[in-house]
Image (cartoon, rainbow, N blue to C red):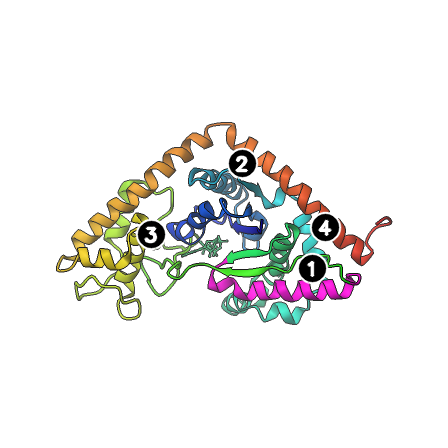
Amino acid sequence: METIFSGIQPSGTPTIGNYIGAMKQFIDLQNHYNCYFCIVDEHAITVPQDPLKLRQQTRSLAALYLAVGLDPEKATIFIQSEVSAHAEAAWIIQCNTTIGELERMTQFKDKSQKNGRTGVSAGLLTYPPLMVGDIVLYNANLVPVGDDQKQHLELTRDFVERFNKRYGQANQEILVLPEVKIAKQGGRVMSLQDPTKKMSKSDSNTKGFISMLDEPAVIRKKIKSAVTDSTGIIEYDPENKSGISNLLSIFSSATDRPVEEIAQAYEGKGYGEFKTDLGEAVVALLAPIQERYHELLASDELDNILDQGAEQARLVANKTLQRMKNAIGLGRKP
Ligand code: AQP
């Protein structure tokens, strides 16, 4: 069976963008692959985080993983910082990656240009090696990512090829070379306030996103105030009508109905009626998830699952880490 690794940062409460673009896909993947679903809290600290909030968001994200239907019997669900092999592997990977490779990463370029090199942490430059570690430690051969992560996956492949060539014995590869599994088209949910920008959980404008834990009244209000256009025509045209097209995509993902079918159903109707129905569809989508989420947070089940997940993850990750250490000559004994 092929192995998949995927993670989400606990950098806020997940949005319906994280759900549609990532979590919803996980539910299906767990039935077909050997899956590791991680809460990547070490990635979240590349930008400043409030310690108490970070811990609460980490637990909350774990509860949401389970509430959407991830099954610990089928997949390994764990928190990155509870498996120390990630940080150790990241160091070895950094020492086998050049500064030039890291400085070429567009995410680093964008953020450091915006804030200046002295205004961002060194972790923002070196987090791609941490991500490489996440993938290689579990021998993942498939990594489901959005378009924006393609460059990091290329870095992972380059690293694995170089590492195996440099340290592997003849015909013996130390690390598994992963393939990219680009998410299905239309997986990008845009901000409700600026539909040219992706919906993000850390957006300072809370009206731009719907969090998975928003109350029904808040969801309805955010959708009502979503930016559209003045034509009043409900059609899917992301280039010229990005706002309404984004809402149509969300409607489609929330109800599992094709975009065209929804657009047709609202032909000749106004944005008001469309937005009211979309609000109800998102409320209906999130209601059972939120109910299960609150049950999980109040039970011991969540911590037991996370303890067990960390243990399972450690077994696999430590073996790979030991292979890496042996290959490069760290420590006294192979
Ligand atoms: N708007 C989105 N539409 C579709 N998929 C999305 N993802 C994120 N936003 C959208 C997918 O969610 C997964 C985990 O993302 P992450 O938390 O690790 O990092 P991110 O992509 O940076 O997500 P955010 O919400 O934008 O977080 P912040 O605000 O902290 O930067 C990924 O699979 C991603 O594709």
Q: Which amino acid type is marked by label 4?
A: Leu
User: In x, y percent, where is residue 304?
Assistant: 56, 31
Task: Write the start and end of the magenta stretch as one range.
Answer: 145-170
Name the mark on residue 253: 3
Q: Earlier in the sequence, mark 2 or mark 4?
A: 2
Under circle 1, the secondary element is helix
Q: Earlier in the sequence, mark 2 or mark 3?
A: 2
Residue 84 visible? The answer is no
Q: Amino acid at mark 1?
A: Ile
Q: Label 2 amino acid?
A: Glu
Which secondary structure is most common in the magenta stretch?
helix
Give the residue number, with chain letter if any, for mark 2.
73
Of labels 1 and 2, the one closer to you: 2
Q: Is residue 151 above or below residue 297?
A: below
Question: Residue 92 at x, y = what percent?
Answer: 72, 57
Instruction: Give the alpha-carbon distance from disc 1 to disc 2, as whole Å.
Output: 31 Å
Q: Check disc 2: other Cα within 10 Å, few if <14, some if 14-19, many if 20+.
A: few
Give the answer, above or below, for where 291 lies relative to 238. Answer: above
Residue occupied by mark 1:
93
Whole-number angstrom distance, CA of label 4 to CA of label 1: 11 Å
Quarter of the image for residue 109 reads bottom right
Q: CA distance from mark 2 to mark 4?
A: 25 Å
Q: Determine which quarter of the picture holds residue 324.
A: bottom right
Residue located beneath label 4 in the image? 321
Q: Real-space Cα distance between discs 2 and 3?
A: 26 Å
Q: Disc 3, disc 1: CB below 8 Å?
A: no
